[in-house]
Amino acid sequence: MQSTNQGVRLPIVGRVAMDSITADVSALAEGTLPLGSLVEVPGPNHTLEDLAESAGTFSHEILTGLSRRYHHQYR
């Protein structure tokens, strides 16, 4: 996962539970990640392949595991 305002990769802590994750933000300076800030999972700087490799799976499995609650935009 990557902080969109700082460009710093943040490790996921623990397990993904339902649609919730916890990120270790200790690499960021205090106060630089205000409540409601966006992170990129995946995105232009963190590909599906990167995410799948970190999870020990394939990119297709990451995509098919996404809930219908997410906005899907096909290009």
Image (cartoon, helix red, strand yellow):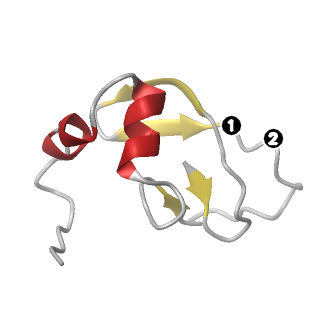
Q: Position of residue 37 (x, y in %)?
A: 59, 66
Q: Which is more toward the observer, 68 or 48?
A: 48
In 3D space, how far apart are the residues under numbered discs 1 and 2 (Cα atoms)? 6 Å
Residue lying at the far bottom of the rendered structure: 75
Query: For mark 2, what is the residue?
Result: 26
Amino acid of disc 2: Ser
Q: What SS does tag 2 mark? A: loop
Q: Image quarter for residue 7? A: bottom right
Q: Is residue 38 left or right of residue 53?
A: right
Q: Image quarter for residue 16? A: top left
Q: Which is more toward the observer, 59 or 11?
A: 59
Q: What SS does tag 1 mark? A: loop
Amino acid of disc 1: Asp
Mark 2 packing: few (<14 Cα in 10 Å), some, or many (20+)?
few
Q: Position of residue 18 (x, y in %)?
A: 28, 33
Mark 1 packing: few (<14 Cα in 10 Å), some, or many (20+)?
few
Q: Is residue 67 above or below residue 54?
A: below
Query: For mark 1, what is the residue?
Result: 24
Q: Is residue 2 above or below residue 52?
A: below
Q: Position of residue 66 (x, y in %)?
A: 20, 46
Q: Is residue 72 left or right of residue 46?
A: left
Q: Image quarter for residue 39? A: bottom right
Q: Which is more toward the observer, 71 or 7?
A: 7
> What's the residue at 13%, 42% (across, down)?
64
> What's the residue at 60%, 54% (across, down)?
2
> What's the residue at 43%, 40% (across, down)?
51
Q: Position of residue 26 (x, y in %)?
A: 81, 41
Q: Quadrant of the C terminus?
A: bottom left
Tags 1 and 2 touching, CB below 8 Å:
yes
